[in-house]
Amino acid sequence: MPRREQAGARAETATTSHSSTPRLERLKRDLVGLVGWRRWAAAFALGALAALALPPTFLLPLLVPAFVGLMWLVEESRAAGRAFADGWWFGFGHSLAGLYWIFNAFVVDAPQYGWMAPFAVAGIAAGTALYPAAATALSRLAFGYRDPGAHGRVLVLAALWTAAEWMRGWLLMGFSWNLIGSVWVISDAMIQLAAVTGVYGLSLVTVAAAAMPATLTGAAAGGQRWRPAIMAATVLVLVWAGGALRLASAGDQAVAGVRLRLVQPNIPQHLKWQRELRRGHVVNQLWMSTQPPASDAGPAAAPTHVIWAETAVPFVLADSPSLIAALAGAAPPGGLIIVGAPRTTSAGVEPQRVWNSLFAIDPGGRITATYDKFHLVPFGEYVPFRGILDIPKLTAGRQDFSPGPGLRTLSLTGLPPVSPLICYEVIFPGRVADAANRPGWLLNLTNDAWFGRSSGPYQHFAAARLRAVEEGLPLVRVANTGISGVIDAHGRVRHALGLGRAGVIDSALPAAIAATPYARYGDGITAIILFVALAAGFLVTPRRR
């Protein structure tokens, strides 16, 4: 054979042996070759695929094709502008599939608000999609500035995706919902990493592991092309093993002398504020609060504290001393009843203001503590840019709610100090407890009836579990229609009452543990892990023969 033909044969053999499977190569070529609306549709579909890994479906294997496809699109984009578009369509599909349940809130009163539903869902999805779009555009710029190895590019994308999630929790009104690390609440062991890195560390390893098989395409040194994907999978195994080891040494201690009763009345949102039904809602919850514990539970199971959900009392308490007296009658001797209700300024005080509040009432009818929600839901509790947008808010009443002063640690009779959180205040990592006055537990009152029997309440409950792990604090969650539950300081669900059910939970209060690294250092740890991932992404290059 002539020398030139021999050299060509050797090169063809080397290319065949060093490349990934022809099927993967063809798949990548077909994907990155798409243009126009076909490319956008593909990115949108990949994002929607990734959303199926979120609670409650937990189809985690779908993260791999989703992020591999995104990685291929980004690395083969000709410019940052195209990468931005790829990331935006991916994020739009991901958010639309993950947040579809917002539609339900606008059709509770369909004649008045139903027309807004498609605009609200699409608008929120479009806005949140800007964050992954920024991540993919910056990734493409980074690849052009200094071309790291294939697995280095994955690390860069994972770090920038995580940084975008962090920014989403802070910019504008903040919305830390469905962070990609929340897919791991399916495993008690996996979420233990959040005690050190917060949920952001889980997001980082999740995106990196899911996208790493993208490196199987292109030239690689023999069998070494599998090395990055195997290492990424090994990291996930190590995260699980570390979490399992942490749980093996975790106890089941509870706070002595405390027995909680959580009341879940399951009142549909369209009935909750009807004038002729409101009194009956309160009477029913009073009855649920005063029922004896199960006959086989023993005298020690009698509740010491009763807790109702967000706005469980659909009246202004200051206007009704007789209602306060009725609530006090449901407070156990020496304990409290803790309820959610609106609060307003006194009559004649200007300007008139209204708050979404929590009240603690003792058996003597004294309001011993209050807390006002400070992180309000846009369009639900207030309308942003009220001077421009002359539309009503979703919640009852014409007046916008006012924000409270911020995080507080309340001292309540017979209980450890508590950090109250109303509704989605629980979704923000690092912002659920006052670090200067560390509480002994977290209390989340919410009303997820707005979202019906959708994914929303499951995603909300997942966020609550992650906050418990991050802070090393037990979390008690009381929801009107579910999911109510008692979560210990390791994020394990001790008791839960499912969605769409009426009933009570009688439970001890799990004990807190020592402040976790994330509770102590918060976003300082986030900055460190992002810097390390970015640096590793640029420094790691494939071994050359």
Image (spheres, helix red, strand yellow):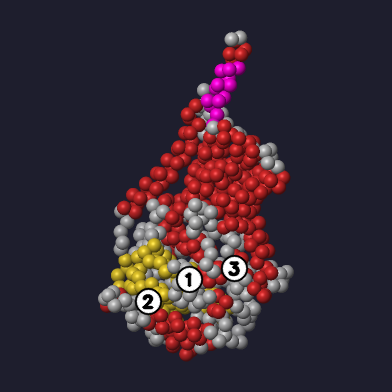
- In the depicted view, which residue is nearer to us: 418 or 154? 154
* Residue lying at 47% horizontally and 87% vertically, measured from the top left: 323
- In the depicted view, which residue is nearer to us: 176 or 122? 122
Label 3 sits on residue: 104
* Residue lying at 53% horizontally and 81% vertically, measured from the top left: 314
Q: As displayed, is residue 233 above or below residue 22?
A: below
- Residue type at tag 3: Asn
Per the image, label 1 sits on a secondary structure element best described as loop
* Residue lying at 36% horizontally and 79% vertically, measured from the top left: 335
Picture quadrant where residue 115 is located: bottom right
Q: As displayed, is residue 69 above or below residue 372?
A: above
- Residue type at tag 1: Gly
Picture quadrant where residue 333 is located: bottom left
Q: Residue furthest top?
A: 2
Label 1 sits on residue: 500
- Residue type at tag 2: His
What is the x, y in percent for residue 307? 42, 75
The residue mark sitting in front, 1 or 2, is 1
Residue segment shown in magenta = 8-20
Q: Residues within 10 Å of mark 2 (few under 14, many from 20)?
A: many
- Marking on residue 421: none
- In the depicted view, which residue is nearer to us: 536 or 48? 48
What is the x, y in percent for residue 9? 58, 17
* Residue lying at 49% horizontally and 85% vertically, measured from the top left: 280
Label 2 sits on residue: 305
Q: Is residue 319 visible?
A: yes
